[in-house]
Image: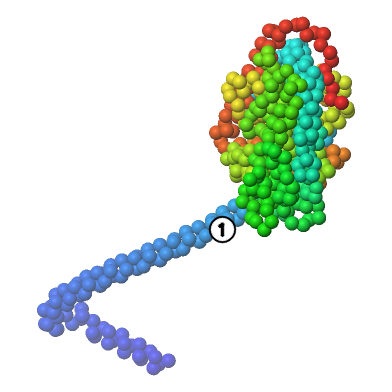
């Protein structure tokens, strides 16, 4: 303790002794060096300040670069996160869209006008806003128009059918008498189809369409091949409405032709080979009537054969008649025209067809042409016709409808309006077959009681509304192809029932100009319909009031 106090006292004493105030200015050299030291210290201080500024700037630069790198990294991360989120949302939206589309298709298939039963309110798309520009006349005006305009125009339909059928019977019998049954095609009895035999023909002159089936001589037969049932179905869905016809032997041997082994009659053509290109033993066929190097029938050569046969048949019986017979349209093999001495004429169509197995489906010859921008149809592709099925469906349906049902009247009025509109603005992509297809869909969806005579205006309005909806969606499905709601009692081939639905409005998807023209023409038709109906109702004579009741399909 004492030692500690001593040390403290010693330190205090030493400090007092060495304090500058106690002994001032002992060292005379201090004032001389003080300014120099101060200057050096100031210079050093300035140098330190500059260094400090440099270091601060360097630190600031490094901090800025670090912040920039962090920002870039954050932005990149955000972009990656947003891109990932966007990809995720895009995928989810696509999946959602596909689910909605599948649901919509299923919903439409289940509740569309193609389904059985149901009221008008159950038909999607047909219970919305009224047709743009359409205001049908009242019931009295519409009934007066139908009775005195359309029924009067078709009053001679029965007599026309009777006259044409009698003449065609005689013509085909003459054709058979000229053919060699061992070497030539065998022509069967005709079948009446289309509007004249479905009782809704409107346009004049009245036109009969008659199918003339033919078969090859033994031992050959036709083997039809449907595109819709082929394992190598075409990508173009419109070809589902076509098929090919193969000529095969009954014993499935070589496809050689017997025309080289027998003598054909003068001016008669073998369906497989040209007159100057008969098959010779061990010789190559140079100009077959089938496709070159193929056993499939060529529609062009079938036309030539049929026209040649009809010409020879007419020359055989021409002396019995007091009129002339001439070919009409060049693109239709059996387009004929009876020319009377009075100057009047009566057209009709004899169409060579080939039956598809044992069904009522027929292959119709045609000229190969491009279908509204689609893939050109080959000359070996034959058009499928459901005309016999359509006639049978209308006949069967009519028996279940009330007496005097308005379904054919509705179709006739729509066909009349379309015909008049075509004359005003020119033809469009909408035809009578589209009108009939729409009616068939409605007949399958409506109850029988909905087609009473008093509901003509409502059903006509509904038919036009169905067409408007189909045009806006660019989708009108073929009534038979791919439509499994068609009753099985129709006897439709299973391959046709299970095929993909065929869209009759597919050309509108490919050709915008055609679609625009058709839509404009359709809305112009709706605009002109009331005026046309009223105008024709006022100027038609009233001497047809005692016409017989409307014909009913039997």
Foreground residue among 214 and 219 = 219
Which residue is depicted at the point 76% across and 29% down?
Answer: 171
| Residue 45 rendering spot, x and y as whole percentages | 23, 72
Residue in front for this viewpoint, 493 or 378: 378
Residue at 80% over, 47% down: 218
**Within 10 Å of the Cα at label 1, are there few (<14), some (14-19), or many (20+) other Cα atoms?**
few
Which residue occupies the foreground of this view, 156 or 43? 156
Image coordinates for residue 80, horizontal then vertical, percent: 52, 60
Can residue 517 be spotted in the picture?
A: yes
Q: Residue at x 88, y 27 (%)?
A: 399
Quarter placement of the N terminus? bottom left
Q: Position of residue 58 (x, y in %)?
A: 32, 68
How many discs appear? 1
Residue 477 appears in the rendering: no
Q: Which residue is mark 1?
A: 84
Question: At 59% from the left edge and 38% from the top edge, which residue is drawn?
Answer: 372
| In the depicted structure, whether residue 43 falls above or below residue 385 | below
As drawn, 277 above or below 329: below
**305 displayed left or right of 489:** left
The image position of residue 446, as x and y in percent, is 81, 30
């Amino acid at each position: 303790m004492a030692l500690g106090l001593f040390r403290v006292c010693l330190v205090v004493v030493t400090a007092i002794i060495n304090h500058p105030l106690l002994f001032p200015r002992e060292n005379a050299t201090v004032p001389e060096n003080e300014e120099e030291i101060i200057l050096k210290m100031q210079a050093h201080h300035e140098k330190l300040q500059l260094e400090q500024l440099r270091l601060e700037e360097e630190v600031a630069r490094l901090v800025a670069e670090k912040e920039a790198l962090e920002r870039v990294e954050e932005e990149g991360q955000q972009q990656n996160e947003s891109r990932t989120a966007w990809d995720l949302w895009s995928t989810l939206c696509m999946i959602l869209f596909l689910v909605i589309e599948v649901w919509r298709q299923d919903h439409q298939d289940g509740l569309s006008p193609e389904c059985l039963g149901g009221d008008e309110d159950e038909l999607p798309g047909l219970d919305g806003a009224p047709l743009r520009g359409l205001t049908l006349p009242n019931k009295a005006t519409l009934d007066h128009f139908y009775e005195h305009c359309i029924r009067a125009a078709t009053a001679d339909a029965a007599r026309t059918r009777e006259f044409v059928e009698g003449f065609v019977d005689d013509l085909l019998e003459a054709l058979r008498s000229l053919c060699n049954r061992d070497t030539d095609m065998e022509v069967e009895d005709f079948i009446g189809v289309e509007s004249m035999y479905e009782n809704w023909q409107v346009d004049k002159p009245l036109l009969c369409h008659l199918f003339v089936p033919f078969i090859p001589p033994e031992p050959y037969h036709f083997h039809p091949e449907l595109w819709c049932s082929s394992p190598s179905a075409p990508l173009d869905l419109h070809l589902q409405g076509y098929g090919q016809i193969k000529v095969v032997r009954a014993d499935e041997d070589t496809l050689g032709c017997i025309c080289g082994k027998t003598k054909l009659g003068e001016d008669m053509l073998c369906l497989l080979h040209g007159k100057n290109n008969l098959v010779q033993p061990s010789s190559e066929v140079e100009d077959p009537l089938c496709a070159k190097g193929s056993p499939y029938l060529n529609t062009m050569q079938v036309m030539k054969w049929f026209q040649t046969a009809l010409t020879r048949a007419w020359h055989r019986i021409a002396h019995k008649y007091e009129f002339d017979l001439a070919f009409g349209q060049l693109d239709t093999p059996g387009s004929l025209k009876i020319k009377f001495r009075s100057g009047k004429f009566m057209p009709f169509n004899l169409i060579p067809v080939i039956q598809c197995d044992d069904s009522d489906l027929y292959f119709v010859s045609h000229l190969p042409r491009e279908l509204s921008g689609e893939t050109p149809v080959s000359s070996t592709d034959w058009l499928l016709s459901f005309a016999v099925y359509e006639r049978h469906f209308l006949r069967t349906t009519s028996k279940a409808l009330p007496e005097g049902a308005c379904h054919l009247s509705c179709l006739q009025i729509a066909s009349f309006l379309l015909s008049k509109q075509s004359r005003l603005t020119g033809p469009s992509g909408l035809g009578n077959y589209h009108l009939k297809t729409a009616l068939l869909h409605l007949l399958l969806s409506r109850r029988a009681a909905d087609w009473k005579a008093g509901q003509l205006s409502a059903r006509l309005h509904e038919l036009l509304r169905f067409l408007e909806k189909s045009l806006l969606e660019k989708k009108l499905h073929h009534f038979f192809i791919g439509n499994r709601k068609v009753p099985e009692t129709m006897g439709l081939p299973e391959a046709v029932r299970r095929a993909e639905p065929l869209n009759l409005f597919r050309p509108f998807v490919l050709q915008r100009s055609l679609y625009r023209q058709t839509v404009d023409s359709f809305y112009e038709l709706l605009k002109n319909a009331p005026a046309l109906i009223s105008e024709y109702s006022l100027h038609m004579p009233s001497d047809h009031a005692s016409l017989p009741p409307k014909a009913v399909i039997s």
